[in-house]
Amino acid sequence: MTALDEDWFARAVGRIWKVMAALAVAGTLATLFWRGWRWGAGFAAGAVISCLNFRWLKNLTDVLGGTRLRRGRALVLAFRYLLLGGGAYVILRYSPVSLAALLAGLFVSIAAVIVEVIYELFRG
């Protein structure tokens, strides 16, 4: 991969992070005012989990691309789904937040990637 390609990917990932942050804040505020604190907290929790998963997937692609991996990071990458599943279980079992809002928040990273694809289609 050339330096130009790496720069293009870095800019795209930066835009995705900004869109994820905007969607997380907007979605949390919208659900908070629309359905109350339980929905707002559920959406925020789902958005945080979605952002964590995106970060871990980005780290995985860095590792596959040849970037060196620290031992601690390898453990987190190996157990990311266990951590996400455990966190979701605790939220669903012991928390009064809305399950539907949590599931909606999980789509924040997917929506951000779709926005980036649309941006690239109209830009190019």
Image (spheres, grey):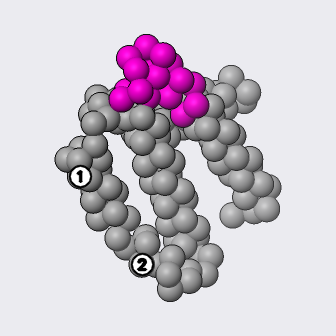
Which amino acid, mark 2?
Leu
Residue 60 vertical placement versus 88 (above, below):
below
Residue sitting at the far bottom: 71
Residue sitting at the far left: 93
Which residue does the image show at 27% across and 36% down from the upper left? 96
- Quadrant of the rendered image containing residue 31: top left
Q: Earlier in the sequence, mark 1 or mark 2?
A: 2
**Which residues are drawn in magenta?**
24-40
114 sits to left or right of 9: left
Q: Can you give x and y, in whole percent of width and height, for residue 1 in the image?
A: 69, 64
Residue 99 vertical placement versus 14 (above, below):
above
Which residue does the image show at 50% across and 28% down from the upper left? 28
Which residue does the image show at 41% across and 27% down from the upper left? 37
Which residue does the image show at 37% across and 35% down from the upper left? 42
8 sits to left or right of 87: right
Q: Main structural element of the magenta stretch: helix, strand or loop? A: helix
Pick the residue in front: 119 or 5.
119
Question: Dot 1, how many residues are within 10 Å of its Cα: few (below 14), some (14-19), or many (20+)?
Answer: few
The disc placed on residue 67 is: none
> Which secondary structure lies at badge 2?
helix
**Residue at the disc numbered 1:** 89
**Residue at the disc numbered 2:** 75
> Is residue 118 at least partly visible in the picture?
yes
> Which secondary structure lies at badge 1?
helix
Pick the residue in front: 5 or 22.
22
Separation of disc 1 and disc 2 at Cα?
Answer: 21 Å
Question: Dot 2, how many residues are within 10 Å of its Cα: few (below 14), some (14-19), or many (20+)?
Answer: few
- Which corner quadrant holds the C terminus? top right
Which amino acid, mark 1?
Tyr
